[in-house]
Amino acid sequence: MYPRNNKQNDPFEKQLMSELFPTRRIQVLLPLPLSGVLDYLMPEEMMLEIGDFVTVPLSGREMQGVVWSLNAPENDIPIEKLKYVVRKAELPPVPDTLIQFVKWVAQYTLSPLGSVLKMALSVPRKFDKPKKKIFYRLSEDLPDKMTPARQKIVDAAIEDMPLAVKTWKEIAGVSDGVVRGMIKVEMLVPVEVSGEETFINPDIELERALLSEEQKQAAEHIITQQRTNSFRTILLEGVTGSGKTEVYFEAIAECLKEESAQVLVLVPEISLTTQWLDRFKERFASEPVIWHSEMTPAQRRRAWWATIRGEARVIVGARSALFLPLQKLKLVIVDEEHSTTFKQDEGVMYHGRDMAVVRAMQSDCTIVLASATPSLETMINAQNEKYDWLYLGERHGPAELPAMSTVDLRHYKLRTGSTISGPLYDALKENLENGEQSLLYLNRRGYAPLTLCGSCGHRIECPHCSAWLVEHQKFKKLECHHCGFNRRLPEQCPNCEALDSLIPCGPGVERVAEEIELLFPEARLAIMSSDEISSPPALKKMVEKIENHEVDFIIGTQIITKGYHFPMLTLVGVIDADLGMSGADPRAAERAWQQLEQVAGRAGREKHAGRVLFQTYQPDHPVLKALVSGDKDLFLEAEAEARENQKLPPYGKLASIILSGADRSKVLSFSKELLKKSPQYDNVTILGPVPAPLSYLRGNYRYRFLIKADIEVNLQKTVRDWLSQMKTGRGIRVQIDIDPYSFY
């Protein structure tokens, strides 16, 4: 055991220890919201390196951190007051590329360095020594003849790799009894292993899908760039159903030919990638290493250990996978790069797509941004030749793009309480009679977004947020979709106590489903929203039901837009195409176009022709005109021109500062004082302070500043210098969002 400072109380003992164990002042970064590192002492015998995981004492407890520097500069803290590193973990060090990435993210987002490190160490018991486990491998002495089921296990064996019983079942496609029967007769022999079960490497030799000429050219371009072993960003744009996934699967296969090379695939929402994982398994005969927030602690630890040891070859995950300790990153894929779910709006506020480009740059590797509806920022970079631009303009196989048209609700009046127009009803009826599936899209969860009293007009709001409670009739409750508060659906008005006076206002997906049940009582329907689908297994079951044509009508929110392929889905009806087309968000029109284009792309993905109906009161809106005409370029050019005129991203820079606290007057007073010290530059504009659109959230009052700056301004320095002029008062929280995507 190395000496610890807190046991050196005697002056003579201190002198003796310093002679026996020469010390060095080092710096350790802890996963805490600290802006910098802490100094510790290291005896020479410990042989630490930068990136090593260590345990150190802090305020009477032990913390785990990372060695950040071996040469801490001299400061005013006497060396005798420093404490010793307790121990070094038996793990490979944090890769230098990850260390540089943590530093870059902290500087760019103006976040504490320790807070960024915390995202890279969000693994429970990561330093624990793994328990010994019993796995099984094939015996060297097997009979010449055996049952077909047992032969499947023999055929599935990967050399002499020991596997768990569950893994043998999955890769061989047999029952638990077959595996245990082979164990009983010693055809599978036990092997004691220390650590987690090894992930099965992808098989790159399997026969690939037949690619079109367009797909081949795109794949060859990416592969040629990969072979240069240099950083380059490639936009892979393709209409929905054009086979973008198969193109970058070719790039993954090429990358895996290099020993120990690792591939990172980012997807918007990992729980919504059931079909993607099935396609990967079909292509590579194994599953990738998965990383997302819904994993169990044991699953996270296994994936993290496999990554830092270089055993995980392909990792697919949500944005947080960027902070995994990848040892030899050679290719990054960002699927659905336009998705707003890549933006983290709490804690360290960063955009996963943009940070993925930085991660690839620091690893000197290729990154592919794939989308049918690329973000305007990405399109501008491609047009300016900052990114390579590959385009797939045809659907793969016999499928053709769906025919799109609008239903003008000014002409086709909706009946009171109805959400289905006459033309949409006729189309749904025809589709049902033809034995084909229909999708009704409404990006609004629950039964109704507002419940009010017909007697006194009282609107039921969340007690902790300035938001209405959403009615969920199926669960007989009202819920806040911002803080999670919920209550039973009351029988009387909370304000005037009138009985049976509460009226649900506006439709949600549950209400649309109720109407469909009345119109088509014989039809089978399913709701796809985050309220109905609580886990990845539940989602997988739902997708399988739709694929097997056990559902006639699908009523879904935006989660249905995430790349699903349903062969018999030929009609998409958008209940409210006007929803979200305008507002304070400068990207509102772009997002509406992306969502509607994506949901429209679910129709007619195989031999059956598809069609899309947009119910709207604004048939001449630029978004709908672009969708119906198929002229997206004209719409994007107009969007780009509007942004450029207003110097909004990507032609300018934005930052948001949210001040919040439980005492409204205190927050407002601090906001006004901060305004007095705001920077006075010709190329920087400060807007605010004003109440945030969601001015009361989770029990805190919120005021917002918005900073607009010309493209050449160092926005981080401007914000940092401004905020450094004032100390944050007690009870006031400051959130900085560089490149904000949410304006709530």
Image (cartoon, helix red, strand yellow):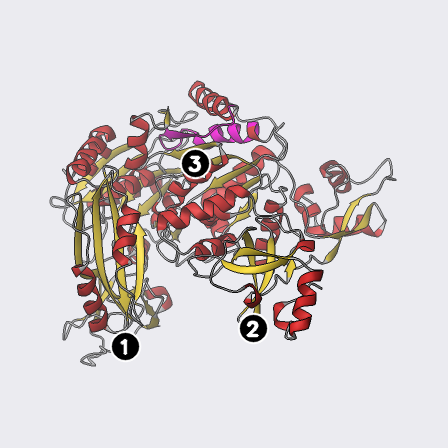
Closer to the camera in the image, 107 or 705: 107
Residue 388 is a magenta residue: no
| Above or below for 246 versus 739 | above
Residue 567, labelled with which disc? 3
What's the residue type where badge 1 is placed? Glu
Q: Nearer the viewer, residue 104 or 245?
A: 104
Q: Quadrant of residue 418?
A: bottom left
| Relative to 408, residue 390 above or below | above
Q: Residue at x 74, y 36 (%)?
A: 155
Work out how far the residue at label 1 is from the one at label 3, CA to CA, in angstroms. Answer: 44 Å
Q: Position of residue 237 (x, y in %)?
A: 36, 30
Residue 469 can be seen in this image: no
**Does 214 appear above or below 3?**
above
Q: Secondary structure at mark 1?
A: loop
* Residue 239 drawn in magenta: yes
Give the residue at x 21% y 34%: 640
- Dots 1, 3 in contact, CB < 8 A: no
Placement of the C terminus among the 4 image quadrants: bottom left
Residue position marked by numbered label 2 in the rendering: 60
Q: Which residue is mark 1?
A: 491
